[in-house]
Image: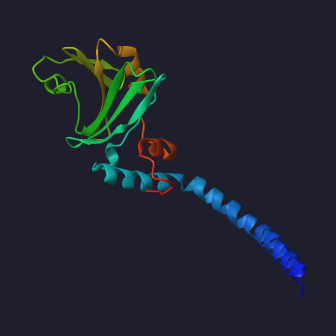
Amino acid sequence: MSMHQDVCMTQNSRALLSLLLLPILLTGCDADKEDGTARTAAGLDAAAKTWGVEPELVYVTEVSGYTVFQASVGEYDGEFVAAYRSKDRATRFGLFVDQGTLTAENCSEQPLGEVTAKRVSCERDGDAWYRKAGASHEYAIPRDGVVIRLIADTEKVDRVVLREAAEAVHRPDDAELAALLPATNGAGI
């Protein structure tokens, strides 16, 4: 058998193998779509472990003109934390998530961020609480045993931005989770 015949047979074999594997590959793609939640959950568990927090604490949000500051993502005092900053980097707000509840009875008793000496005012706004103390304000959303807080300086980030962030709070999908993690040079979690 000549070298040319060997190459032709190898090319034909590859083409045939590709055609035979195509239905399997396509079925595998459908399985990924159906199993997206499981893949996200596994990635979320691994990322949460990396940050040192429970997976149920990991949330993200979306606000026009703001992006997550990747270096800020992680654990602080047992909470999941992420900072979002404006495109011009002039303003920012923080997303903090910890276990607990927030009710009409305990809303004003819970400190607002680092502001502990100031009286906290609480106003119900849909499913969330708008809270203010001193020069800080936040939207706090109690959900499934956790409280998600979006906090900022009243002089720098207005209530509309925090409300937009509160309305958009959700569990991250695979792409959002990847955006929170530092680059791994192609290595997965």
Residue 169 appears anywhere in the view: no
x and y percentages locating residue 162 in the rendered image: 37, 21
Within the image, what quadrant is residue 102 found in? top left
Which one is in front, 119 or 114?
Answer: 114
| Outermost residue toward the top in this view | 155
x and y percentages locating residue 48 in the rendered image: 34, 50
In the rendered view, tell whether residue 4 sits above or below residue 47: below
Left or right of 149 in this view: 112 = left
Q: Residue at x 37, y 54 (%)?
A: 45
Within the image, what quadrant is residue 17 found in? bottom right
Coloration of the structure image: rainbow
Q: Residue at x 25, y 39 (%)?
A: 98
In the rendered view, tell whether residue 165 sits above or below residue 1: above
Which one is in front, 182 or 61?
Answer: 182
Q: Residue at x 16, y 27 (%)?
A: 110
x and y percentages locating residue 79 in the rendered image: 25, 40
Left or right of 80 in this view: 29 = right
Which one is in front, 71 or 159?
Answer: 71
| Outermost residue toward the bottom in this view | 1
Q: Residue at x 73, y 69 (%)?
A: 21
x and y percentages locating residue 11 in the rendered image: 83, 72
- The C terminus sits in image quarter: bottom left
